[in-house]
Image (cartoon, rainbow, N blue to C red):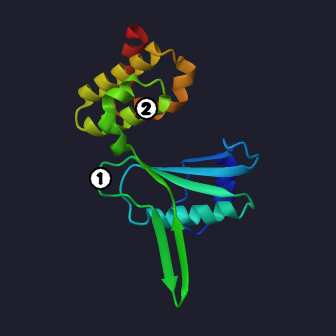
Amino acid sequence: METELHELLAGAAVGRLHVDKLARVRLLSGESRLILLHVEVQHWPESDFPERLYNYHIRLSQRGEPVVTAAILADTSADWRPSRYERALLGCRVVFDFPIGKLQDLIENREELERSESPSAFLVLANWAAQQTAHDERERFQWKLRLMRGLYRKGFSREELSSSTASWTGCCSCRERWNTNFETKS
């Protein structure tokens, strides 16, 4: 629903306007209720992040549908875990709590992630590898090959992987070498 979302947020005076993912989902509980699920992925600590999420949530709520806003924290700071926005003035108070998932917490089980059949495990590993190899292009390239080959061994097709990996595989200047080696060695 990103197209609808960008139209909704156009012109909003809330600073940077970029929502990572918005989807309409059905609840697994069997309840036939549609909600908007807004997931924001944040790669670095940002002081106004909770306020920005609150502003997105309010704008999305104006559609008249229930909204759940959640954050995936993909940064390297162990202590940065924002999960609340609060504002008070003259007896008027707003509190907005949102669930978070900290990727850094998941990497403690790296071997389990590498064995997992879930594409989400790959994304956690890819984020971790990108952080660990930020200043070593050769090592980053080796991690890319390792992770992509692992996904192919698990039966994922090129089409299934292309959209979720496009930004990660092109994140450094080795894209051409990546494409050449991946085509010939996978």
Quadrant of the image occupied by residue 186: top left
The residue under the point 41% across, 61% down is 82
Tell me the element at label 2. Answer: helix
State the residue in front, 107 or 29.
29
Earlier along the polypeptide chain: callout 2 or callout 1? Answer: 1
Q: Nearer the viewer, mark 2 or mark 1?
A: 2
Q: Position of residue 83 (x, y in %)?
A: 45, 61
The residue under the point 60% across, 62% down is 57
Q: Is residue 165 above or below residue 16?
A: above
State the residue in front, 131 or 10.
131
The residue under the point 43% across, 66% down is 48
Q: Amino acid at mark 1?
A: Ser
Q: Is residue 11 visible?
A: no
Could you tell me how many numbered marks the image carries?
2
Q: Amino acid at mark 2?
A: Ala
Q: Position of residue 155 (x, y in %)?
A: 51, 14
User: From mark 2 to mark 1, how far is it between C-alphas?
Assistant: 20 Å
Mark 1 lies on residue: 77
The residue under the point 29% across, 53% down is 77
Mark 2 lies on residue: 121
> Which residue of the protein is positioned furthest toward the front in this rendering?
29
Q: Position of residue 7 (x, y in %)?
A: 69, 55
